[in-house]
Image (cartoon, grey):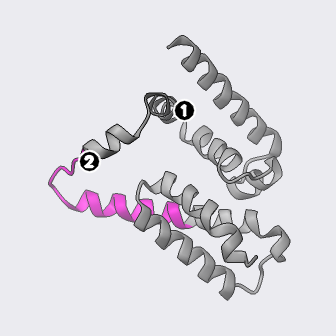
């Protein structure tokens, strides 16, 4: 399995969650792999995941900053499009409830939770991606799961 085959799916899912756009996510992941192949200081392929996720995260942050700056230049208010009826029907009620609960978490908790559950990274790898300590990663994950459990049980 090639490096791209192994990591592209999890990276796109991570970027899509952070950016809210499939096209932007694909751009971020493409740039991540370009940086991998251009870099002279990259880890071996066995330890590539933290490096790729860190570079992708930085690319996402840069894209979000640029988007925010572009939006600030416009005086018009941009509203989010409403979901299509097909999307509403396709989403189950329980999935929507979990998504709402996750969106109420802090951005740090959301990111750490996503890297752990969706990308399957270890605490050490998450620490490498985010710049947090391993114990701090554990704290944020614990708090996120505790909050989700309390919120979902209460409803």
From what the image shows, is residue 52 above or below residue 35? Answer: above
Disc sitting over residue 105 in the figure? 1
Mark 1 secondary-structure assignment:
loop
Q: Residues within 10 Å of mark 2 (few under 14, many from 20)?
A: few
Q: Which residue is mark 2?
A: 80
Residue at 71 percent of width and 46 percent of height? 116
- Residue 37 marker: none
Residue in the picture at 26% in, 42% down = 85
- What percent of the width, then of the height, locates residue 58? 58, 64
Q: Which residues are magenta?
A: 59-82
Seen from the viewer's position, the closer of residues 1 and 16 is 1
Local secondary structure at mark 2: loop
- Between the C-alphas of marks 2 and 1, the distance is 21 Å
Can you tell which quarter of the image residue 38 is in? Answer: bottom right
Give the residue at x 62% y 78%: 33
How would you rate the neighbour count of disc 1 (Cα within 10 Å): few for under 14, some for 14-19, many for 20 or more? some
- Check the picture and name the quadrant holding the N terminus: bottom right
Vertical placement of residue 135 versus 34, above or below: above
- Would you say residue 68 sits in the magenta stretch? yes
Residue 18 pos. (x, y %): 50, 53
109 vs 126, left or right, is left
Whichever of callouts 2 and 1 sits on the residue coming sooner in the sequence is: 2
User: Percent position (x, y) of residue 16?
Assistant: 49, 57
Above or below for 133 versus 34: above
Magenta region's main secondary structure? helix
Q: Quadrant of residue 36?
A: bottom right
| Left or right of residue 78: residue 147 | right
Instruction: Say which residue appears at 63% left-offset and 21% top-offset.
Output: 149
In the drawing, does residue 4 fall left or right of residue 152?
right
């Amino acid at each position: 399995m090639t490096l791209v085959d192994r990591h592209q799916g999890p990276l796109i899912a991570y970027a899509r969650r952070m950016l809210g756009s499939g096209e932007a996510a694909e751009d971020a992941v493409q740039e991540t792999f370009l940086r991998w192949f251009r870099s002279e200081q990259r880890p071996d392929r066995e330890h590539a995941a933290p490096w790729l996720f860190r570079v992708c995260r930085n690319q996402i942050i840069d894209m979000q900053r640029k988007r925010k700056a572009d939006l600030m230049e416009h005086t018009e208010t941009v509203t989010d499009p409403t979901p299509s009826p097909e999307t509403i029907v396709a989403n189950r009620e329980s999935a929507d409830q979990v998504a709402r609960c996750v969106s109420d978490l802090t951005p740090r908790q959301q990111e750490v939770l996503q890297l752990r559950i969706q990308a399957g990274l270890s605490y050490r790898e998450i620490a490498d991606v985010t710049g947090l300590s391993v114990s701090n990663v554990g704290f944020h994950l614990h708090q996120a799961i505790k909050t989700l459990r309390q919120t979902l049980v209460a409803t």
